[in-house]
Amino acid sequence: MGSAGSGRSVPRLVIAAPSSGSGKTTVATGLMAALSARGFAVSPHKVGPDYIDPGYHALATGRVGRNLDAYLCGAELVAPLFTHGARGCDIAVVEGVMGLFDGAAGEGELASTAQVAKLLRAPVVLVVDASAQARSVAALVHGFVGWDPEVRVGGVILNKVASDRHEELLREALDSVGVPVMGVLRRAAQVETPSRHLGLVPVAERSAVAVEAVSAMAAQVDGGCDLSALVSLARSAGALHGAGWDAGEALVSSPPPPLPFPAPGASPPDPLVGPRGPRPRTPDGLGGTPDGHPVVAVAGGAAFTFSYAEHAELLAAAGARVVTFDPLRDEELPEGTSGVVIGGGFPEVYASELSANEALRKRIAELAARGAPVAAECAGLLYLCRELDGMPMCGVLDASARMSERLTLGYRDAVAVGDSVLAPAGTRMRGHEFHRTVVEPGAGSSPAWGLRTPERRVEGFVEGGVHASYLHTHWASAPGVARRFVERCRTS
């Protein structure tokens, strides 16, 4: 175990693969857990927009799993966000996305694991599913090693190896490639993690079963991989230059947003006083804390597991007190709530339980009716609808939601159609859609976003203080979103 680093100099590895389904999550999560068990402070990261894998990473390391997405945040933020997350750690493990060179469709290497590895100056370990090949593995690895000379493939881990003889054949073939085999993993059913319509079942829903799965991954990696060689490879990563991302500094350096538009029927804020003065407590107990910090309630629990850690950090840096609530269990919003953020998750799985919590649904509807800011993404959008699969939801939006056979998936370029609690009209952001549900209608009279797709469609809802959309966005790319939201909490 080495001394904790500043983030820029932390040893690091990128765990990649030729294709999805090769075993990246098993190897990355198992390696994180195995190193943690040996006393390393491990910083966990995931390439791309995925929310579920970072939950397993957090369980393996005891630290927040963080995403590195060059499409959502821009390539220039990848290294600063990594440095921010890795500060104080001994080693960092970065799980890739899809195949090593796969990225945003039609955008070259953008948002690929290869691009992130280059931006982090990190060596790559290639996880190869060897279950249906022998000597051909050499041609496969040789191709990945030579495709982009700037990507340094420093080792191979062979996954789903059938027998000792199979392993011998694979090693003989790879001797000619010049890339060391750093691990050989046999087939092991106990490390399989349950999946459903959007991928792996989140950690928050599996509790003890998830702990057992991570422990099994750790045991498999510890027993089948050369941890010393992997740590040595991680220590060969090049130094990163520049400071790590900081939520407070990001807010200061971002362009100041226009003053939040007033709630329906309210007077605009006094320009001589500004929007930052402390708000008086309202008779019903909502409206912030006595010290003037507005309370922003963020949905959590098993139904709402999708959230980027930087969102809460930006809200706090903007002056909010961030409090988590569970729509499955809590019948009241946190005391003093003046704004609500409801991110992604699986409300369709918990529709009956969410519907049964009528008290909380009413509280959220009342808050929205007063013009308080409510930001909802994907699962949050479904929860705010009139109904989901026929079961009553919050009724904030005059729309119904239902499950669908069709998967909607992909990056999106978006433009804010009108002013909202998140952004003024014309604001451009990048986002990601990932759902098997349909909301009808798909957009309100004031849509949230215009998507720069071939059909130029609009989607989402802006009504009073509500901004609800299928689009997942990463606020680190536009810190003014958090500041604008908190300002609206102060003034609504």
Image: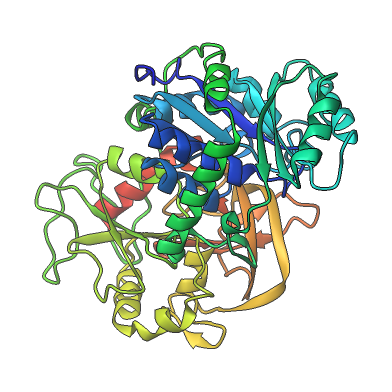
Q: Quadrant of residue 101?
A: top right
Vertical arrangement, residue 194 with respect to residue 313, above or below = below
Q: Residue 432, how many percent across, how many down?
A: 62, 50
Q: Quadrant of residue 193?
A: bottom right
Residue, far front: 165
Which of the pair 185/268 is nearer the observer?
185
Vertical arrangement, residue 113 with respect to residue 282, above or below = above
Q: Residue 375, how many percent across, how many down?
A: 43, 58
Residue at (61, 57) in percent of width and height: 192
Which of the pair 305/180 is nearer the observer?
180
Q: Is residue 243 left or right of residue 117?
A: left
Q: How is the image coloured?
A: rainbow
Residue 159 visible (yes or no): yes
Q: Residue 177, how many percent across, how many down?
A: 83, 20
Q: Is residue 414 left or right of residue 33?
A: right
Q: Quadrant of residue 367?
A: bottom left
Q: Is residue 273 left or right of residue 396?
A: left
How many numbered marks are there? Answer: 0
Residue at (73, 40) in percent of width and height: 104
Residue 245 visible (yes or no): no
Which of the pair 361/352 is nearer the observer?
352
Vertical arrangement, residue 382 with respect to residue 157, above or below = below
Q: Is residue 438 left or right of residue 10?
A: right
Residue at (42, 66) in percent of width and height: 302
Tell me the quadrant of the picture where the C terminus can be found.
bottom left
Tell me the quadrant of the picture where the N terminus can be found.
top left
Q: Residue 481, how many percent across, how many down?
A: 43, 44
